[in-house]
Image (tube, rainbow, N blue to C red):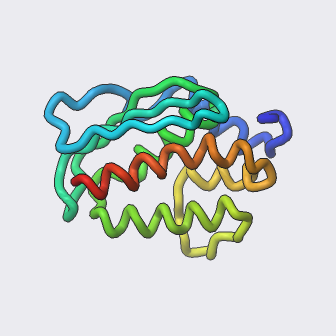
Amino acid sequence: MINELDSLYREIILEHYKSPSKKGDLPNAAVTVEGNNPLCGDELVYQLEGNPECITKVRFSGNGCAISQAAASMLADELEGKSAAEIITIITKLKAMMQGQPLDEEEDLGDLESLAGLSKFPVRVKCAALSWNVIEQALKQL
Ligand code: ZN
């Protein structure tokens, strides 16, 4: 299915899958939250340091398909230095994007924008959405 995506987006996804950002453990994490997508067998653990005013450090670990692990890496890249409220705004935009809504020009979701093509593949949206579903749980516990 990944071959059906635009080649630029495919490249960004595969790059994050092969060389993930922020992969690892945080021994002093404020929260550790895990989740899974049973439809595909994807598993993710996110760890955050900081507080609701500023998430200072993010790491993840997990197993699963390229899309789930690439999305986890892309999202982790966007979180450090932001507040919980700012992250919830990003997640709201992501959810709209995955339902096929175009982003406004001034909105910048970084490499996460490469996931937009998945909106045509609802089963794969669940692979990507695992990452922000876990982050939403983590923010509630922060
Ligand atoms: Zn998957």
**117 sits to left or right of 141:** right
| Quadrant position of the N terminus in the picture | top right
Residue pictured at 26% horizontal, 44% vertical: 48
Q: Which quadrant of the frame does ligand 1 lie within?
A: top right
> Which x, y percent locates residue 61?
40, 28
**51 sits to left or right of 18:** left
| Quadrant position of the C terminus in the picture | bottom left
- Asked whether 109 or 96 is in front, the reply is 96
The quadrant holding residue 57 is top left
Above or below, 105 against 15 in this view is: below
**116 sits to left or right of 34:** right
> Which x, y percent locates residue 17?
57, 29
Above or below, 26 against 125 in this view is: above
Above or below, 55 against 104 in this view is: above
Residue pictured at 38% horizontal, 62% vertical: 87
**75 sits to left or right of 81:** right
